[in-house]
Amino acid sequence: MATVLFTSEPGVAIALYDGTVLPITLTVQYWAGLGTSGYLARNAIITGVTVSSRGTYQFQQTLRNFVYVYVFGERMGDVTIHGLTFMSNCVQCYPPSSPDCIEIGQGFSGISMTADYYDAWKATGQSNVPGIPLGISFGLMSLLGFLTGFNISLTDPKSRIGKFTLNFKTTPW
């Protein structure tokens, strides 16, 4: 279901379900993680994805106006995942002051949790252990990609909301 986001106070967002269906479903391996409720709250949401691919080829034109085309196959593709980070913990109810609320997020900001995801799954790995390819699927397309880059910025200090991107290099498809 699609949601509409409103900020209720600095660093806090409220999601309201509008009843429509998303055009695609995006899944990034290990993004949700596993916690006590089945998912690890990241205090961050994925808002978009960009996929690009291109071939490797060469065109050669001769003096007699013949054109030769040499095709060498596909290059690795690029996938960029865009999102928003929040500075407060996630709360599993509304209004947040309700006695039945459960606060999740381990007290970390979305910025640090997203940076931790990059650090845990980057292609360069940790402690001489090489990174592994992660599964990325949306719609009917599934790809394997290596997490190669990470950008984050605090775009709205007043509401304490930031933007992030995760960059993947994917195997040719």
Image (cartoon, grey):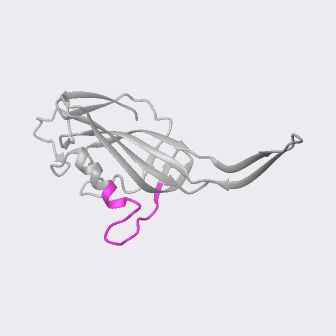
**What percent of the width, then of the height, locates residue 170?**
52, 54
Q: Quadrant of the N terminus?
A: top left
Q: Is residue 18 above or below residue 58?
A: above
The magenta segment is 118-135
Q: Is residue 162 above or below residue 29?
A: above
Q: Nearer the viewer, residue 157 or 68?
A: 68
Q: Is residue 112 visible?
A: yes
**Furthest residue in direction right, as rendered:** 64
Q: Nearer the viewer, residue 3 or 136?
A: 136
Tell me which residue sits at (46%, 33%) in the image: 21
- Please tell me whether residue 128 belongs to the stretch shown in magenta: yes
- Please tell me whether residue 17 belongs to the stretch shown in magenta: no
**What percent of the width, then of the height, locates residue 42?**
27, 48
* Quarter occupied by residue 37: bottom left
Q: Is residue 38 visible?
A: no
Tell me which residue sits at (56%, 48%) in the image: 141
Looking at the image, residue 95 sits to the left or right of residue 49; the answer is: left
Total marks placed: 0
Q: Nearer the viewer, residue 11 or 24?
A: 11
Magenta-colored segment: predominant secondary structure? loop
Looking at the image, residue 110 sits to the left or right of residue 144; the answer is: left
**Furthest residue in direction bottom, as rendered:** 128
Q: Quadrant of the C terminus?
A: bottom right
* Quarter occupied by residue 132: bottom left
Q: Nearer the viewer, residue 90 or 71?
A: 71
